[in-house]
Image: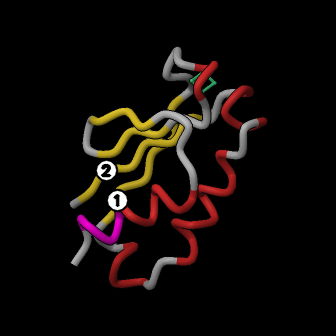
Amino acid sequence: MLTVELCMGTSCHLMGVQDLVAVLETLPAEQREQIEIKGVTCFKNCGKGPNIRINGELISNATPDRLLEILQANLA
Ligand code: FES
């Protein structure tokens, strides 16, 4: 199980966190089932958004490509 936490704060919103949400939504169902998705108010790292945390590891300046890369490396 992979835990993906997405920052829902204003800065990360403006920096495109919704593009990362879109990536999660396009995954096939069998991969989606392996992910627990959570929203976080703010990681206090607003200058480097969008911020996400995957299994406890903070990823700043996250891009859809980077997220996909991590997901494919961790999902069956
Ligand atoms: S708004 Fe995302 S880290 Fe603060």
What's the amino acid at mark 2? Thr
The quadrant in which residue 46 appears is top right
Judge left or right: residue 22 versus residue 66. right
Using the numbered discs, state the Cα–Cα distance from disc 2 to disc 1 in whole angstroms: 12 Å
Q: Which residues are magenta?
A: 70-74
Assign the magenta stretch its main secondary structure: helix
Query: Local crowd at mark 2 within 10 Å, few (<14), some, or many (≥20)?
Result: some
Quadrant where the C terminus sits is bottom left
Contact check, label 2 and label 1, Cβ < 8 Å? no
What's the amino acid at mark 1? Ile
| In the rendered image, the vertical position of residue 4 relative to residue 31, given as above or below | above
Q: How is the image coloured?
A: secondary structure
| In the rendered image, the vertical position of residue 4 relative to residue 58, given as above or below | below
Residue 48 image offset from top left, x and y in percent: 58, 26
View extreme (top): residue: 44
The quadrant in which residue 32 appears is bottom left
Residue 39 image offset from top left, x and y in percent: 52, 40
Q: Which residue is mark 2?
A: 3
Q: Which residue is mark 1?
A: 70
Residue 55 image offset from top left, x and y in percent: 26, 44
Q: Nearer the viewer, residue 16 or 42?
A: 16
Question: Within 8 Å: ligand 1 and the Cβ of disc 1?
Answer: no
Residue at 51% from the left image edge and 42% from the top image edge: 6
Residue 73 is one of the magenta-drawn residues: yes
Residue at 35% from the left image edge and 64% from the top image edge: 71
Residue at 39% from the left image edge and 64% from the top image edge: 69
Name which of mark 2 and mark 1 comes first in the sequence. 2
